[in-house]
Amino acid sequence: MTATPAPIAVALDAPDLATAVGWAEAVGPYVSTVKVGLELYLAHGHDAVRRVRGASGGRDLFLDLKLHDIPNTVAGAARSVADLAPAYLTVHASGGTAMIRAAAEALPQTRITAVTVLTSLSEADLDAVGLAGPALDAVRRLAVLSVEAGARALVCSPREVAAVRAAVGPDIHLVTPGVRPAGAALGDQTRVATPEQALADGADLLVIGRPVTAAADPGAAAAAIAAALAG
Ligand SMILES: O=C(O)c1cc(=O)[nH]c(=O)n1[C@@H]1O[C@H](COP(=O)(O)O)[C@@H](O)[C@H]1O
């Protein structure tokens, strides 16, 4: 077990609970956080969250449900997961100020984490959905709006993290998916950087899924990334 686990949230995007529990056990010694997202939560719910958290050795919980609805509904959804005491709960920043505030008020102990612009989206994708202009402009605008509404963490790509840090200051946790060790397959991610670069640019927590969980030995993959970050 490493003395200080690395600031990594491993995305436990597994089709079944047994696989997710195995990954959580393997990576728990090396990482600070485990992330449960829609694939696992929608199939197995609260029980899955408790099981993987236990298997990880009690690492912090990042509950990635990307809530996006009217404020009353989002507040209710946030209350529905209060007993899991997540350190982070995601909402889509584009849901707007009142929605983010409703989540923050419903779950004051949790860092409501606003997802700015998905790391899978390219500049061309943004054009197509009517968000013309550099991704950075939209990310920065949504970041500032979210923090003003009570978000205490933000998700952006590692390419934008330095600019977002400059815009929101030191107290907001910046979380970056779209992290790929050099040479790793990008999959569906487009706005990416290496773990070392993301951390150097000011990220507090790196979300990493397939580079760890698709490896032959997920524990060894997590340990290698953690060691690279420590070095
Ligand atoms: O909110 C997230 O965690 C998230 C936001 C985002 O913009 N991009 C993104 O990839 N994610 C999540 O981060 C994880 C990335 O997984 P890999 O691409 O396998 O490393 C997945 O669980 C995504 O759902």
Image (cartoon, rainbow, N blue to C red):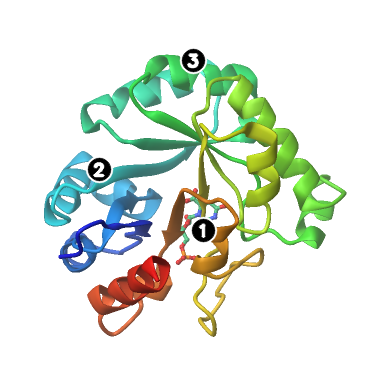
Q: Can residue 116 be seen in the rendering of this structure? A: yes
Mark 3, residue position: 72
Secondary structure under badge 2?
helix
CA distance for labels 3 and 1: 36 Å
Mark toward the start of the polypeptide (1 vs 2): 2
Which amino acid, by three-letter code, is at mark 1? Answer: Leu
In the shown orientation, is residue 18 left or right of residue 10?
left
Q: Which mark is residue 45?
A: 2
Mark 1, residue position: 199
> Which residue is located at x 17 percent, y 61 percent?
21
In terms of depth relative to the viewer, which is nearer, 180 or 93? 180
Q: Can residue 70 be seen in the rendering of this structure? A: no
| Horizontal and vertical percent position of residue 46 | 21, 39
How would you rate the neighbour count of disc 3 (Cα within 10 Å): few for under 14, some for 14-19, many for 20 or more?
A: some
Residue lying furthest right? 133
| Horizontal and vertical percent position of residue 5 | 27, 57
Secondary structure under badge 1?
helix
CA distance for labels 1 and 2: 32 Å
